[in-house]
Amino acid sequence: MATATKTPPGADPKQLERTGTVREIGSQAVWSLSSCKPGFGVDQLRDDNLETYWQSDGSQPHLVNIQFRRKTTVKMLCIYADYKSDESYTPSKISVRVGNNFHNLQEIRVRNTDHVTVIIYVCGGCCGG
């Protein structure tokens, strides 16, 4: 999601989109996963249904790759994690890496989820993150 203004903590990303504060740009990207169980892949990760989710099925680290076709500025990434729904599949730590290709990715943010229900805002220039 991209935003032109500072986003208040705890704000609902869908409400922010409806008011024009942010714009969802994930559909402009190609999404891939390091692994997934059948029926728990990219479609469930992106379907806006809080009852569905991605489940990895392989060795760690578990990765979600989001590749844009051209250079794209992303100012905010919102991740919903719900330990009550997906228990052992809830990440304990989320690392965000950016770059021009897989070979030059650099970590820009690390967030712990603390195994609770949370919307994690990983911000670039918008929130001082």
Image (cartoon, rainbow, N blue to C red):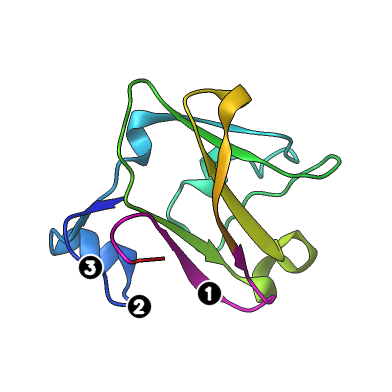
In the rendered structure, the answer to whether residue 50 lies left or right of residue 90 reads left
In the rendered structure, the answer to whether residue 25 lies left or right of residue 84 reads left
Q: Is residue 42 above or below residue 75?
A: above
Q: Quadrant of the C terminus?
A: bottom left
Residue 103: which quarter of the image? top right
Amino acid residing under circle 2: Pro
Amino acid residing under circle 1: Val
Q: Residues within 10 Å of mark 1 (few under 14, many from 20)?
A: some
Q: In the image, what residue occupies the spot 40% across and 30% down?
A: 29
Mark whose residue sits in front, 2 or 3: 3
- Write down the residue under mark 2: 9
Circle 1 SS class: strand
Circle 2 SS class: loop
Q: In the image, what residue occupies the spot 72% across and 39% down?
A: 36
Q: In the image, what residue occupies the spot 47% across and 58% down?
A: 49
Q: In the image, what residue occupies the spot 82% across and 45% down?
A: 60
Residue 123: which quarter of the image? bottom left
Magenta stretch: give its range.
111-127
Q: Which mark is residue 6?
A: 3
- Write down the residue under mark 1: 118
